[in-house]
Image (tube, rainbow, N blue to C red):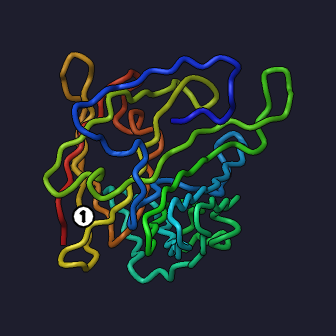
Amino acid sequence: MRPEALVKRLIAAALVFSSAPLLADSPATRQWVRAVAKAGGLNGEAFVSSLRIVNPNGATANVSLTFLPQSPIDGIFTAQGDNSSRTPVTVSVGANKTLALEDVVGSTFGGAAPFGIPAGAIQVDSDVPVSVLSRTFVANAKSATGVPGTYGFSIPAQIETQAVALGDTAYIPYISSAPGTGSGFRSNFIMANVGRVSGVPVASVLHVKLVRGDGSAVGERDYTLGKLSAAQQTNIAASFGVGVWATLEFVAWAGS
């Protein structure tokens, strides 16, 4: 995450490499924003997402944005919404400029929710490398004393080498389950299937296992995702029937 406000004091640290590292947020021509929304929460929260596209090049960037809406997860843990025929929206970002897209789901994609969920992922394709950052926040938040404001989080876009590829094993080290929806911390698990075989989108299977801190398994299951589909398992630890912190391990492979 990246802070949204400046503070008066900054403590800076630097890593020194013997060879030149990649930029902290290296621009790319294809990348994915994993989670955007224009939706209401369980307690009346108004979740909204904004996008920033930075063009560090000396020429205009022509950028295609393809919205991949979430589809519901059914009783056998499949989310089969097919997004392979979605029409992209094209925007232009001037040389060395930043384009701000506020309320990107509502303004850029017209609040699209073909599967009944106004949330999803965005595929970003550009003719020159660009850098993309999303922010999702609660627009109607208030402090403990009732002062209006916002709170949320920022997520950089991911490139292909950062995705969980066929046969990869990945981990989310901290998964928590709250005792109820009104207090505590709970973890939602968001998935976006961008798998292709010979350039053609395919369904994919994600094997998920929840593991306690002592190494014992709480449970495991398969999620099947349709072509370019996206989905969210709300409060995933509770969906396994536990109320403690744990680690989520998942392996991806192609389906049919």
Check the picture and name the quadrant holding the C terminus: bottom left
> Residue 196 versus residue 100: which sits nearer the camera?
100
> Residue 145 versus residue 124: which sits nearer the camera?
124
Give me the residue at 63% from left, 53% from top: 49
User: Which type of secondary structure does the marked residue at label 1 adopt?
Assistant: strand
Determine which residue is flagged by label 1: 204
Q: Is residue 35 shown above or below 124? A: above
Q: Is residue 14 shown above or below 206? A: above
Image quadrant assignment for residue 11: top right
Q: Amino acid at mark 1?
A: Ser
Residue 61's x, y, as percent? 53, 72
> Residue 190 versus residue 60: which sits nearer the camera?
60
Residue 16's x, y, as percent? 31, 26
Asked whether, in this view, residue 237 is left or right of residue 223, the answer is: right
Q: Is residue 73 shown above or below 113? A: above
Residue 44's x, y, as percent? 73, 44
Residue 167's x, y, as percent? 13, 53
Give me the residue at 64% from left, 54% from top: 50
